[in-house]
Image (cartoon, grey):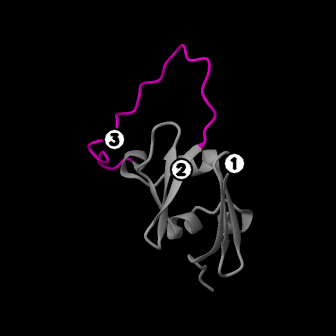
Amino acid sequence: MPFSTDPEHIAISKSKGIKIDWKDGHRSEYGLRYLRDQCPCAACTGGPRGHPDTPPAQPANPFQMYQPALKMLGVEPVGNYAIRIDWNDGHNTGIYSYEHFRRICPCEECQAA
């Protein structure tokens, strides 16, 4: 049976992550680091550079001793099919479709499939 990409309920914690209950009864939980690493935007997936107003990535600071904890500054719906996350690292161009969320579900059942 194909899996559902229609969310029943979405719970967002800006400091912990996102939990989605799907209409087929499945539940997915996405931690912040996992979500940030799975960003589907062109800049993160190796495609052409995103929007021209997106600031360039900052080079790594070899003397950096403190890195602020990753968190979401804001989350907004994109139509009825996705959400956009504004990260505290300055990134905000990724549009996470519900299909993408379901495809990257980190649970054992989905990873095995």
- Name the mark on residue 74: 2
Magenta part mainly helix, strand or loop?
loop
Residue furthest top in the image: 63
* Residue 52, picture quadrant: top left
Amino acid type at mark 3: Thr
Q: Residue at x 63, y 48 (%)?
A: 14
Amino acid carrying label 1: it is Lys
Residues shaded magenta: 46-71
Residue 54 badge: 3
Q: Which residue is mark 1?
A: 16
In depth, the one of 11 and 109 nearer the eye is 11
What x and y, as percent, mark residue 91? 45, 42
SS for dot 1: loop
Q: Secondary structure at mark 3?
A: loop
Measuring 61% from the left and 29% from the top, which residue is drawn there? 68
Number of the front mark, 1 or 2: 2
> For residue 103, what is the image quadrant?
bottom right
